[in-house]
Each structure stands twice: as C-alpha cells, then as structure tokens.
Image: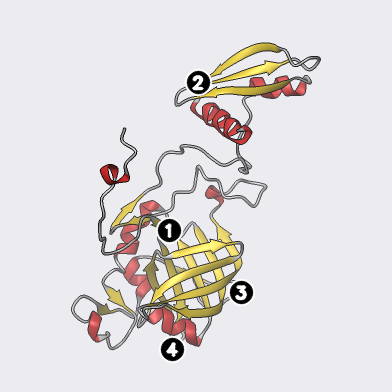
C-alpha cells in the first residue's frame, strides 16, 4: 500500500463537518412559560460541563439568554422519526426571513414530535420522557462564534437521568452494550456499530476465566500475540516465571481483552 497521502486521500469541501455525533433534543423555556424543543447534534462534554453549538436566531438560544436553564435529552437510535418530525419547524414567531421558505412556526413541539414532557427536578424546562438519557443543566456562559452564525453554550450538568435498561445495576455507569444513541452524520441517521475494542480504563473488561483462576492461584501471565481472530497468552509459574501453558483465545471479547493488554504493555 502506498504511503503517499496524495494517492490515498483527496481534498474535498463538504458543506458541513458532522462526521458523526449523537443527536440531542434541547428543551428550553419560552417567554410564555411553555417548553420549546429543538433537535441538534453539535456538542461535547468534559466532566460535568457540556458545550452545545446552537444556531443564532433560533428560539432555543433566545430562550437560554433569558432563562439560563435547559435539559439535554439523548434519544435512542430507534427514535429517529420523532427527531425528524421537528426538522421543518421553529419556535420563532414570526419565522425569521431566512427560514421562511423551509420552516413553519410550531408552538407545540412535544406534540409535534410525539413525545411527552416530564418535570425536571432542578431546572424549569421539562425533560423528554421517552429519551433514555436526560441531563438537567444550567448555563454558565454563552460565547459567540467567530462567524456570528452560532453560539457555544457552556452549561453545568446538575442532574442525570438514565433509563434503567441502559445502566449497570448497583453502579453509576451506563452500560455501553445497552446504550444505542442516535448518531447523525452528513444528514443521515445511524445506530451504533459493533463493538471493536475498549480502553484500559473501562470497568467492564472481564478477564478470561482461565487467566483469572491462574492469577488467583498465584501465577502470572503475559499476552504474546493478539490478532483479529485469536490471541496467545502465556501462563507463567509463580516460582520462576517459566511458561507453564500457552492459551489460545478465540472468543471475540477475550481477543479484544488481550489486544488491550498487549497495547498497554508496549
């Protein structure tokens, strides 16, 4: 395979850079006290802070500048139709001139989407009852973008609500195998793909049973090979480190576990 970037890549000018992020429904409070619900996907989170990219001139941003509280609701992949029902409507009345050709005013966003509002515990705007993951948040600051087309809303998450089926019982963890967020990329919706690996910090990586028993008996081990369909692990004696046995792992999750161990030891 050629290593020359000119032969493997081409220069393009995409109209948007949504390479693939989870969709969220942001709920804010209108001047008359009713909720406004709008779909978006530009965001990132660090710790208890979430940063949302919201369009200037939209009702959501106008509401947040007046009442700096919101909920951020993440729908499941199977709920994409509810999100799409909000695509051609706006909470602004009158509809801004630049949107008049393709948007209509809709004051009843929840009804339009076929979703139900449920009261929040710490902020005024309600949550989306059907969304598996719901965040209550308070705005810390709103930063304008360099172009003036959108703003970056920095908010502190004050409470998290997660559907039981996507959590690990007895912990505060989301179950990555059960959580299927709706992914938006280049105007298409996707479900999450198959698991291909994990980081060494995950709390859900299970040591293969044979290796676990070997450790409990006082022995040690080392991964000597990890490929796409199998891995090789040497079980070492506790008295001198000699190889007592070589294991071949073929279960996909065990192979991924071995891959992580090998990567960490490099």
Q: Quadrant of the N terminus?
A: top left
The residue that label 4 is drawn on is 32
Q: Earlier in the sequence, mark 1 or mark 3?
A: 1
Query: In terms of image quadrants, where is residue 144?
Result: bottom left
Mark 3 or 2: the one toward you: 2
- Mark 1 nearby-residue class (10 Å; few <14, some 14–19, many ≥20): many
Residue 66 at x, y percent in the picture? 49, 87
Q: Is residue 162 visible?
A: yes
Q: Earlier in the sequence, mark 4 or mark 1?
A: 4
- Mark 3 nearby-residue class (10 Å; few <14, some 14–19, many ≥20): some
- Mark 4 nearby-residue class (10 Å; few <14, some 14–19, many ≥20): few
Q: What whole-number distance in Å separates the C-alpha atoms at marks 4 and 3?
A: 20 Å
Q: Are marks 4 and 2 in contact (CB under 8 Å)?
A: no
Q: Quadrant of the C terminus?
A: top right
Q: Is residue 173 above or below residue 259?
A: below
Residue 52 at x, y percent in the picture? 46, 70
Q: Earlier in the sequence, mark 4 or mark 3?
A: 4
The residue that label 3 is drawn on is 122
Report how many numbered discs are placed on residues in the image. 4
Residue 85 at x, y percent in the picture? 29, 66
Q: Which numbered disc covers residue 250?
A: 2
The residue that label 1 is drawn on is 75
Work out which residue is located at the far top of the displayed protein and give it: 244
Mark 2 or 1: the one toward you: 2
- Mark 2 nearby-residue class (10 Å; few <14, some 14–19, many ≥20): some
């Amino acid at each position: 395979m050629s290593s020359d970037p000119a032969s493997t890549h081409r220069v393009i000018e995409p109209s948007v850079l949504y390479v693939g992020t989870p969709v969220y429904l942001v709920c804010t409070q209108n001047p008359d006290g009713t909720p406004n619900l709008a779909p978006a996907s530009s965001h990132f989170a660090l710790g208890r802070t979430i940063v949302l990219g919201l369009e200037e001139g939209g009702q959501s941003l106008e509401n947040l500048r007046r009442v700096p509280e919101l909920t951020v609701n993440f729908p499941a992949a199977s709920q994409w139709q509810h999100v799409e029902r909000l695509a051609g409507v706006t909470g602004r009345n009158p509809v801004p001139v630049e949107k008049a050709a393709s948007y209509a005013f809709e004051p009843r966003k929840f009804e339009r989407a076929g979703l139900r509002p449920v009261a929040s515990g710490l902020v005024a705007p309600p949550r989306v009852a059907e969304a598996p993951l719901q965040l209550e948040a308070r705005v810390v600051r709103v930063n304008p973008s360099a172009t003036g087309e959108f703003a970056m809303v920095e908010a502190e998450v004050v409470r998290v609500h997660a559907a039981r089926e996507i959590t690990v019982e007895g912990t505060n963890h989301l179950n990555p195998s059960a959580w299927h967020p709706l992914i938006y990329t280049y105007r298409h919706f996707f479900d999450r793909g198959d698991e291909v690996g994990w980081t060494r910090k995950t709390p859900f990586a299970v040591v293969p049973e044979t290796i676990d028993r070997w450790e409990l008996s006082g022995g040690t081990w080392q991964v000597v090979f990890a490929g796409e369909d199998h891995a090789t692990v040497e079980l070492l004696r506790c008295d001198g480190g000699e190889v007592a046995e070589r294991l071949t792992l073929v279960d996909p999750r065990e192979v991924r576990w071995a891959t992580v161990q090998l990567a960490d030891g490099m």
